[in-house]
Image: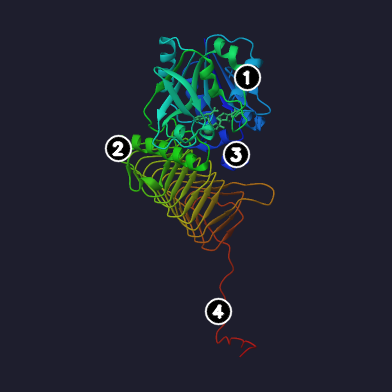
Amino acid sequence: MLSVAILAAGKGTRMESSIPKVLHKISGKSLLQRVIDTCIKLNPDQIFVITGHKSKEVQKSIPENKKIKFVIQDPQLGTGHAIQVLCKEVKKHDGKLLILNGDVPLIRPNTLKNLLYLHDSKNADVSLITTKKTNPHGYGRVFLNGDFIERIVEEKDCNNLERENRLINAGIYCFKWGNLSEIINSLQSNNNQKEIYLTDTVSLLKNSLSLEVEDNGELQGINNRIQLSECEESIQNLIKEKHMLNGVTFINKASCSISEEAEIGKDVIIEANTHIRGNTKINSHCIIGPNTFIENSEVGLSCEISNSTVYASQIMDYIKIGPYSHIRPNSKISSYSKIGNFVEIKNSKLEEESKVNHLSYIGDSIIGRSTNIGAGTITANFDGQKKHQTKIGKNSSIGANTVFVAPINLGESVTTGAGSVITKDSKDNSLAISRTEQVNIENWERKKSLSN
Ligand code: UD1
Ligand code: CA
């Protein structure tokens, strides 16, 4: 029987934040969610998440799962106290209890499996993950006696000599739960932080073992925003390396960020300052960026998107977007289209080979195949209360600065005169024009301004 407990009750004072520490995110996912997702891969029988500070907020952030149970620790008197509360709340203490700090988000399932293996094969009372750090500042120092851990001393309780020890406690432990519950209530808080330390259990148990692993970044704990950004960087490096090995070029790797879920095809070039977020798929031979943000969207083959933002939309093949366009949610741009300079598109469908080249707003619209939207065209889709649709048939030619006062339905091969305000539907092959005729008054004398 394998049970997991994740410690997530602390405030995270050193984050200087109104958000609980474990809800801070790296690469779009909270620290706590990352630890939970990793633990689920071990297929445990049950997962206890210990919450306390802003517990409602923390619990709400986790999607429902039958295996996950929340235990409230209030007040929060230390990591040992958290487990005292758990042992009191849960009556059965069978099998192994794997305890993880909720602020060590990069721990890998394989490392946990190695810990469980060591624990079982050596029949340990407790086994825990340790590593030698070049800079161990802030971590509990682990002191060995032969093969066994003798004690762990927190940074704040170390004397100068103890502080020299570079072997640190990663905050990840496997206990024989039965043995742990027998000693858990004898922990004291007679230390410099006046807290009940979980780490004091190792001196109370007999067979305490250390699994020393290489310091490859996965054991980084997050106590402040510097460590948060270090973890973000290590995760981003891994993601980008994966894509580079799969045939993606990064022109300026450090300035780009890519979500873990993103899929990127071969021979895609990611230019500087480009951010691919959420569930996004970029197909082969695209050039994305510079200065581009794409979230929850699919981009087809051989597209070029520069200096633009795309949210929750579908961009098909051989399309050029930008510079400076904003494609808002629920848009579909069909193949061979061109969305040009300073164009905003929202909740609209553009058929193949459409062109919206300059300075337009197209909202709630359906634009037919091979239709050209002239510079400055605007759909006035909102009447102050409701949004309305604009429909323009295929092969149409929309004059510069046309305003469509929606709802509007134009047929196919329609032309609109430049500067027209279109308020009525029109049929196939018609010209729609609404503007006053130009008047030329000859020999017009300009009024002299008063100041002259
Ligand atoms: C802890 C360890 C330290 C180890 C380090 C690894 C102790 C006493 N020290 O120190 O040896 O090197 O982690 O990263 O355990 N929490 C609760 N309830 C509480 C207090 C904390 O649930 O009452 C949770 C926090 O939300 C956090 C985790 O426990 O997720 C660790 O707490 P933190 O205060 O960050 O411990 P460290 O000082 O980092
Ligand atoms: Ca910590």
The residues tagged by marks 1 and 2 sit, at their Cα atoms, a distance apart of 51 Å
Q: Which residue is mark 2?
A: 247
> What amino acid type should be assigned to the residue bearing mark 3?
Thr
Q: Which residue is mark 3?
A: 13
Tag 4 secondary structure: loop
Q: Tell me which label, 2 or 4, sits earlier in the chain.
A: 2
The residues tagged by marks 1 and 3 sit, at their Cα atoms, a distance apart of 22 Å
Residue 262 in picture, x, y percent from top left: 42, 35
> What amino acid type should be assigned to the residue bearing mark 4?
Asn
Name the mark nearer the viewer: 2 or 3: 3
Name the mark nearer the viewer: 1 or 4: 1
Name the mark nearer the viewer: 1 or 2: 1
> What amino acid type should be assigned to the residue bearing mark 2?
Gly
Whether label 1 touches label 4, CB < 8 Å: no
Asked if one can make out residue 319 in the rendered structure from this viewpoint, the answer is no
Residue for point 49% across, 13% down: 206
Residue 175 in picture, x, y percent from top left: 51, 15
Q: Specify the farthest residue to the bottom.
A: 452
Name the mark nearer the viewer: 4 or 3: 3
Which colour assignment does the render follow? Answer: rainbow
Left or right, 276 with reference to 94: left
Tag 1 secondary structure: helix
Q: Tell me which label, 1 or 4, sits earlier in the chain.
A: 1
